[in-house]
Image (tube, rainbow, N blue to C red):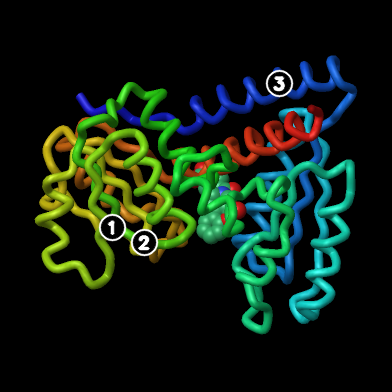
Amino acid sequence: MTTVIDGRKISAEIKAEVAAGVEKLKAESGITPGLAVIIVGEDPGSTIYVRNKEKACAETGIYSEKHELPADVSEEELLSLVYRLNDDPKIHGLLVQLPLPKHIDEDKVIDAIEVKKDVDGFTPVNVGNMLIGKECFLPCTPHGIIVLLQRSGVEIAGKDAVIVGRSNIVGKPAAVLLLQNNATVTICHSKTKDLAAHTGRADILVVGIGQPKMITADMVKAGAAIVDAGINRNEEGKVVGDVDYDGVFDKVGAITPVPGGVGLMTVAMLMFNTLEAAKRAAV
Ligand code: BQF
């Protein structure tokens, strides 16, 4: 019997725990955690994601601000908004929704975010601290993947974990966190020779590449745990992952659905990080 890893249930648990933490912080210190989200332009995906974040803030008792800038805003103007929010005491967490328009240097903008407010975990200092296992804000999607596995009873230590995709937002940090949890980790990417030979040995397979139905039944190990971090639209306009869900379902031991899996955890872990940022500001 295949287990559906229920991102809806587990993200709701995380948000309930965050809501309780927010109440406690308010009662004990009078501090309300605050999240500021900057969105540049009107990318349809980004608009939905930002709305999901605002909704999650409302659910957990976190104060939220949305700052909408036009697509043709200058880098300078965006940076000065980041600096202003860095210094705003109501704001404990600050993120700039990616991707940014091509005329803006994403790395430069990320680097401008105060490390103590970097609830996406994207600043170089946070990434470095994560790599050496020091206290930091963990990036939301990979952290969400670890929590999904832990809370659905998938053992990580000693397992062969294979990651397909090496983005700075999903694949690379997922590899680091799985390694920290004592998996034996392989990272596959577009230049990997014989992808199926690697994926077919995975006890835990994490996929984030942006290719619908890229991972098929012949490529997975029987009984494996499959984590699908892909979000694509198929020919019918339906949201689908990178894994051929129906095709692999009967063969695998556990699998995350899309939608209703990793994506929900990304937003829940952002709430977790924002509460953490506010707690640290309180001491
Ligand atoms: C779901 C994101 C790519 C690039 C930038 C729930 C979200 C998505 C899916 C969501 C994502 C993806 C976010 C589902 C935030 C995850 O039920 O499947 C929630 O809101 N996400 C983002 O902010 O930036 C992205 C993916």
Q: Are marks 2 and 3 in contact (CB under 8 Å)?
A: no
Residue 21 disc label = 3
Structural crowding at the residue carrying mark 3, measured as other residues with C-alpha within 10 Å and reported as few (<14), some (14–19) or many (≥20): some
- Classify mark 3 as within 8 Å of ligand 1 or not, answering yes or no: no
> Label 3 amino acid?
Gly
Return the x and y of residue 52 as percentages of the image width and height.
66, 45
Along the line of sight, the residue nearer the viewer: 260 or 274: 274
Question: SS of the residue at dot 2?
Answer: loop
> Label 1 amino acid?
Lys
Residue 213 disc label = 1
Label whose residue precedes the other's in the sequence (1 or 3):
3
Along the line of sight, the residue nearer the viewer: 129 or 193: 129
Label whose residue precedes the other's in the sequence (2 or 1):
2
On screen, residue 20 versus residue 170, left or right, reads right
Assign the C terminus to one quadrant of the image. Answer: top right
Question: SS of the residue at dot 1?
Answer: loop
On screen, residue 87 versus residue 38, left or right, reads right
User: Total of numbered circles in the picture?
Assistant: 3
Residue bearing the label numbered 2:
166
Return the x and y of residue 229 as percentages of the image width and height.
41, 50
Query: Cα distance, mark 2 to mark 3?
Result: 34 Å
Q: Relative to residue 60, is residue 220 depicted above or below?
A: below
Q: Residue at x 20, y 47 (%)?
A: 247
> Label 2 amino acid?
Arg
Question: SS of the residue at dot 3?
Answer: helix
Q: Residue at x 74, y 54 (%)?
A: 114
Structural crowding at the residue carrying mark 2, measured as other residues with C-alpha within 10 Å and reported as few (<14), some (14–19) or many (≥20): some
